[in-house]
Every structure is written in structure tokens, then in C-alpha cells.
Amino acid sequence: MFTDILIIGAGLAGLRAALAIHPQLQVLMITKTPELTTSNSDRAQGGIASVLSPEDNFEGHIKDTLTAGGDLCDSKVVERVIHEGPRRIEELVKWGANFDLNADGAIQLGREGGHQMNRVAHAHGDATGHELVRTLVEKVHEAENIKVWTGAYTVDLLTTEDGCVGALVKSTKYGRIAIWARQTILASGGVGQIYRETTNAVTATGDGMAIALRAGAVLRDMEFMQFHPTVLYVAGSARHLITEAIRGEGAYLIDKNGYRFMYDYDSRGELAPRDVVSRAICRQMIKTDSGNVFLTLKHKNAEMIKARFPGIYSTCQTFGIDITKDPIPVRPGAHYMMGGVQVDECGRTNIKNLYAVGEVSSSGLHGANRLASNSLLEALVYGAAAGETASVAAQEMSNHFQVIPLEYSTQKVAGDVLHLEDIQNALKSLMWRYAAVNRERKRLEEALSTLNKWHTYVLSGSFKSPVGWELQNMLIVATMLVRAALAREETRGCHNRSDFPEMDPQGNYHITFVREESS
């Protein structure tokens, strides 16, 4: 298969990148999911942050972002993304996105943790991501130059001394296929599925980061996994995100004794940044010997709550919880990876002709802790930038396509003795026990030792299906996370070392990996 632009992944960043490609160029977007709406983007509840009110200003949004980021944000990136935000939202409205509006027709704005102003636009109460993905999917389907393959798993990138030239793919429709492309954009999402407790879609197995690392790309800031403080915790059920916006509307956090505890940990209470709230919840759970805490909204108007959070209201009802009067059991869960493939201001990686956008990337916007609702904004800004830059680069390249002989090392085939699902479940449990909200050296070293043992018989084998490939990718990114967490001997942003509880004044550096060599 030959194409001008190959986009791997179909979340908000990938969709926006596709729409930025020049209409004379052929785009192939591939996703391992059976449909375009199975992504973390589609699951995003809270909203998209931007300066949309005359009472707000860019300087305030920039300051809040930098403060949350723990002195690791790239200030130039922050300024650029935030200044571009209103234009990208105006673009979405023009394309048919239906944001919630005030009586005067202006976009309704909520507040979330870390924001000093109401600047979070939302849609259908708590279904913002779904609305934005719907809008862009419709635009993609209208574009004659964009072809979409679902059920297409990217096994590895194709690279030469001249850079990335495409990818090896296993498609349910076309079988094993080499896709040759002038420019390739990674938009494959995050890594949340390496944890037992997670808000992420089942697709978030770190594939993009792993294949980029194998190709020679730089991974950066892998220790900075953000844990969302409030994930619905009902034993035996799938985990469901309880958006931060619910605290922005006045929900309290209480422990099993009914005590409102957040002000014991931070003067901002429930609206402190996510890392602060997650750590406070974990400490209160230990203090009260409990497996969870609770969110309560019973002091708020019931009809307003049902109208503002219809998705959460419906989900909780499934478990017999009426959020207008019953406390919601919650605990932290893996939510968003700030680290990823290092990119420049246009989404370019260190590998020629390869880009990365969205959660798979490390752009410098989020630093050590993402400010709430900045991720959808980043996806739009960087998706557009990468698409436009790749278009120009592709048009400057020769029209000549050439199939290049493939070379790869021969690996032993993994035998039937491996129960892949069991190993995957063990990996998730290991990461949750030893490398989640609270970390310390001994437990991280135990985790790394176990991961290295799994390397010997999981990474050395060749698999023939996505189950094996996903496990290998999860093992790679989990190892990079643990190694980075061991190397950063301080507490900064969402990285919490109980044996190094203070922020190191000299710690505003980045930890990077290139293949198996770290720096």
C-alpha cells in the first residue's frame, strides 16, 4: 500500500491532523479499534480549557498551566497552545460542534482543579470528548482524500537511514501489509492500561511509544503518569471516570466517616491540582483503613446535577447510586501520560518524516502534571500543526515510491506455554502496587526486577496476533516508566516519591530514553 500521509491512531489529535492535510494529498488513517470512536478522546468528560470569557486572559491560563506543571513545562509551548486555543474552538463550532451554551448564547464555562477562572467549555454536560470526536469524524468522512482503515494494528514502523517510510500493519481486512508513506504521524494515545486501576480505553496499551522507541525515537518524562483522583470504585465493575468538573460544581470529598478532609491537605480544597488531590485521597484511605473515599453532591440542586452530568448520573444509577443524594465511592486511577515521544513545536520527532501528536507525545505543554482539560486543546493545536507541516514536507518529496527490502532479526516463536492474558493482568497489578500514586525505591526496584524477568521470555519471542504485540509494548513502556521513576529522586508534579517527599530545586530536568540507552 502506498500513501502520501499515514496517520496511526484515530483520537482527536489524529483526526485533526488528517483534516489539516492538503486535499491533493492522499491520507490513510489506521486504527486498531473496530470503530473511530473507541479512544480516550471519545471518553473525555470534563471539557476543553481555553480563554473564552472577557473576564479571563491568556496570562492567567498560562500561569495556571505552568504552576500545575511543576517547573517542567516549556513556557514557549504553553504560550503558543493557549493563545491558539480560542481559534481552534471557534473552528470546532464552525464545523458543527455543539457546546453547552448560556442563555445569552455564549459558551458555558466551568471550573476545574488548578484553574483560577471558569474557562472549561463542555458539551452535553459531561460528554465533551464524544461531541468533539463526532464532529471531526463527520468531517473526515466528508473528505475525499482521507481513507480510514479500522481493525488495523501497527506492528512496527518502517525506517531507513533516511528516516521513517511507513509501517508494518496487520489488518483484519487486508492481512499483513507494508504501508509505504512519505510522512507518518503517530496519534496512537496513551499507556493507562498498564495499570489495574485506570480510566483509559482498552486500546491505551502504549503501542505508539513502544514502536517509536524501537525505531530510534526519544521518549521523555515517562515517570509522569497522572492519576485522576476520582474514579468510580465499585468492586468487580469496570472503572468509570468521575470528571473533575463535578468538584468544580461544588462536590465535596469525604471519608468513610463523613469527614470533609481536603482542607487538611491543601488550602484549595477539592479544587487543588490532581496530583495533590490524588495523594490526599490515598493518605486519607490509609488513615481511615478504607479502600475508597466518597464524593457527595447532596447539598446541590438535584435537577441541576442531573442536567449537568447526565452521563455520570446514568452510570452511577446502574450501580444503585443516585448522585443527587448518595455518596459516590471513588479512588484514584491512572489517567493521562504526560511523557511520551519527544517532539518539537510542529510535532516532529528526532526521526525524519515521523511526527507524534496527542497523548503519545511529549510536547512540553504539561510538564510534570497536566492542568485539567488542557489535553483536548493540545490535541487540536498539535494535530493541526503536524498535519500542516507533514503536508508541506510531503509535497516537497519525490513522487517516486519504492519498495525497500525488509531486514529484521530472527526471533524464536513464543510457544503455547505462555498465558498472555495472565501475564498482562500480573503486569497491571504489579504496576498498581509498586509504581502508582505513591512510590519508593525498594518497591520500584522490586517492580523493575520482575519486569526484567518477564523480558526474558516475552520480549524475546515473536507473536502472530495483537494480544502478544500489545503485551510486549505494555512491558516496554512499563519498564521505561519504572526506570524513570527510580531515577527521579524527588517529588514533583504527579511523581510522588515517599522516600524523597520534597521537590529538588535542581530537579527541573528531563529524563530521556533512546532504545535501551537512557540519559
Image: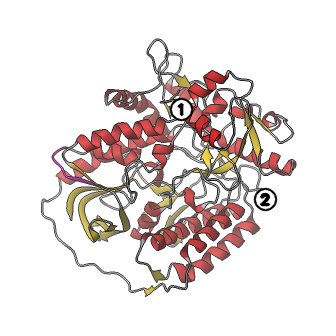
| Of callouts 1 and 2, the N-terminal one | 1
Residue at horizontal 62 percent and vertical 36 percent from the top: 244
Q: Secondary structure at mark 1?
A: helix
- Decide: is 347 above or below 68: below
Please tell me how crowded label 2 is: few (under 14), some (14-19), or many (20+) other residues with Cα within 10 Å.
some
Residue at horizontal 74 percent and vertical 24 percent from the top: 299
Residue 393: mark in rendering: none
Queried whether the magenta region covers residue 24, the answer comes back as yes
Residue at horizontal 30 percent and vertical 39 percent from the top: 138
Q: Which residue is mark 1?
A: 62
x and y percent of residue 153 in the render?
Answer: 37, 64
Q: Amino acid at mark 1?
A: Ile
Q: Locate the C terminus and report the quarter of the image it occupies.
A: bottom right
Q: Locate the N terminus and report the quarter of the image it occupies.
A: bottom left
For the magenta stretch, what is the residue range? Answer: 23-29
Q: Which residue is mark 2?
A: 499
Q: Amino acid at mark 2?
A: Asp
Q: Residue furthest top?
A: 104
- Decide: is 281 above or below 487: above
Residue 76 visible somewhere in the drawing:
no
Queried whether the magenta region covers residue 217, the answer comes back as no
Judged left or right of residue 419, residue 138 is left
x and y percent of residue 70 in the render?
Answer: 63, 44
